[in-house]
Image: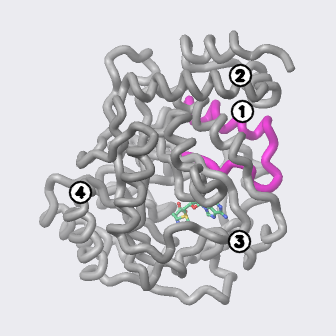
Amino acid sequence: MPNVKPLIEKLEANQILSKEEFYTLLTEISDQDLLYLRERASTIARKNFGNRIYTRGLIEFSNHCKNDCYYCGIRRSNKNVPRYRLSEEEILHCADTGYTLGFRTFVLQGGEDAYYSDDMIVTIIKSIKKKYPDCAITLSIGEKSYESYQRFYEAGADRYLLRHETANEEHYQKLHPPTLSLKNRKQCLWDLKEIGFQVGAGIMIGSPHQTETNLVEDLLFIKELSPHMVGIGPFIPHHQTPFAKETTGSLRQTLLLLSIIRLMFPSVLLPATTALGTIHPEGREMGILSGANVVMPNLSPTTVRKKYELYDNKICTGDEAAECRYCLEGRLNRIGYQLVVDRGDYKPFPNLSMSDKK
Ligand code: SAM
């Protein structure tokens, strides 16, 4: 194995590499150099965030979806999923529980469900903001028009998560039906950014047909977009999807990508995802030790948790919100970190390059 340490040092210094250099780093890094990379990434995260981990309360408010993404357990064609929707009152109840537990960001996530009109989403945003003006709201409800995004922003939503899934057109088509386009998904991200949201892009590691060249394209697209958040988690098959027999994304590659992202974006908000915790019992801890600085425990009512199964064996589907929070707190404490009561907004750090200050 060649020594890629100089590339790691170059990435840390410049926050970018050429296409060829990224490819070499992804394909030729040894286990020993990966340890070095993870150590550099966690040092940068510690320098910028100390041992403070931001927490977001995830409210999965609907598992209805008009889309049919080949990888997703709640895709429209999966007739075996019992579908549910939370009412405004139920969503507010989740927020109440979350606030008491110390959450200061609520993530409203769901399938693309037209039942919730823009007016309803606006009402929900305003109700949460009225009750909890000190909290941030993150939306993760898919592709909408510029006008809809604008309305959500004006109603008080602060952030928007929309993983681009892959920056390569051909790969995108292998993961999605022809009704969905990468062009539109990317446009949504640019629109969200222009409107003023803190924006999150991201990918699944090891999604079917993904190549290392695709990952390089992802890194270059993420650099160009310069988002405030990056969602990176392993792909995990769901038994009732066309990808049921595909292989799970690897822990090693997920940690590698998390660390590369931290070196590229020292101040980015980077979650150690539930999917990472699903493929390894200490996956989220390893994510934090590879440069992640956010966790997103579940606040959804336990009655619906199992029904929001995007992939098989998703963890924490039986736990109460409080159990999830305290479990994660204990896990983080054991590795020397603490969960903080904080909105955890994106803040560019003063020692960063111009591209990171956007
Ligand atoms: N509908 C919204 C959207 O399209 O962005 C938000 C919900 S969607 C289910 C949230 C994310 O779950 C997707 O962006 C995708 O990356 C992830 N996801 C779906 N199926 C997955 C799987 N089998 N393994 C890992 N992650 C998955």
Q: Amino acid at mark 3?
A: His
Q: Is residue 195 visible?
A: no
Whichever of callouts 2 and 4 sits on the residue coming sooner in the sequence is 2
For marks 3 and 2, the one nearer the N-term is 2
Magenta stretch, residue numbers: 201-225
Q: Real-space Cα distance between discs 1 and 2?
A: 19 Å
Ligand 1 is within 8 Å of the C-beta of the residue at disc 3: yes
* Residue at 57 percent of width and 56 percent of height: 277
Q: Please say if the residues under marks 3 and 1 sit with CB atoms less than 8 Å apart.
A: no
Of the residues under marks 4 and 3, which one precedes in the sequence?
A: 4
Left or right: residue 307 versus residue 131 is right
What amino acid type is highlighted by mark number 1? Val
- Residue 308 percent location from the top left of the image: 53, 75
Q: Position of residue 352 (x, y in %)?
A: 40, 17
Quarter of image, res 22: top right
Secondary structure state at the residue bearing disc 4: loop
Using the image, determine if residue 69 lies above or below residue 46: below
Q: Amino acid at mark 2?
A: Asp
Q: Which residue is mark 4?
A: 102
Q: Position of residue 230 (x, y in %)?
A: 51, 42
Residue that carries the numbered disc 2 in the rendered image: 33
User: In front: mark 3 or mark 1?
Assistant: 3
Picture layout, residue 15 above or below residue 45: above
